[in-house]
Image (tube, helix red, strand yellow):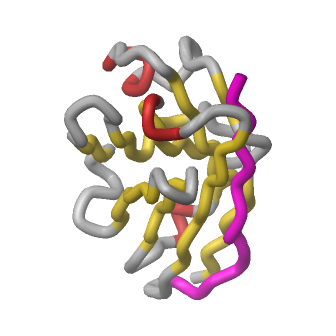
Amino acid sequence: QVQLAESGGGLVQAGGSLRLSCAASGRPSNNYNMGWFRQAPGKEREFVAVSKWSDGLIYYADYVKGRFIISRDDAKNTMYLQMNSLKAEDTAVYYCAAAQFWIYNDWSTGGSGLSYWGKGTLVTVSS
């Protein structure tokens, strides 16, 4: 079992930056694919970014590419999401997720097949 806990959300002005953290406990994070999703009010959960543990590949959703950076420090069992040039449409609850086995569709289609989830952290971007 892996427990995930997000932190770092808050209120930020459009154009600003924020860094989210996801702390993993229970098992070492270096054997898990870890990533981020978000869910805006009234909308479905959507994929943001993922970091594969086996080969280090990283994937981003088109709407955050070039603005967000996912990284991980496996020595600290922590994953990060650096969010730059934030827009009002980035407002959402951000969730971290993890899974031991890599199935791309699990990440690209809302995450329903993923094993572990945090409770989320709210990011509000004011315009």
Q: Residue at x 31, y 69 (%)?
A: 67
* Residue plotted at (35% across, 14% down): 103
**Which quadrant holds the N terminus?**
top right
Q: Is residue 97 above or below residue 72?
A: above
Q: What type of secondary structure mainly makes up the magenta span?
A: strand
Picture coordinates of residue 77 (x, y %)? 57, 51
The residue positioned 56% from the left and 59% from the top of the image is: 76
| Residue range (magenta) | 1-14
Which quadrant of the structure image shows residue 64? bottom left
Residue lying farthest to the right in this orientation: 119
Query: In the rendering, at what x and y percent does residue 90 appear?
Result: 52, 62
Residue 119 belongs to magenta span: no
Tell whether 43 sits left or right of 121. left
Residue 30 drawn at (x, y percent): 44, 39
Image x and y of residue 3, in percent: 74, 36
In the picture, residue 118 is in which quadrant?
Answer: top right
Count the marks.
Answer: 0
Q: Is residue 52 left or right of residue 78?
A: left
Using residue 64 as the reference point, say whether residue 87 is left or right of it. right
**Is residue 2 one of those drawn in magenta?**
yes
Out of 12 and 78, give the one closest to the viewer. Answer: 78
> Can you say whether 47 is above or below 74 in the image?
above
Q: Quadrant of the C terminus?
A: bottom right
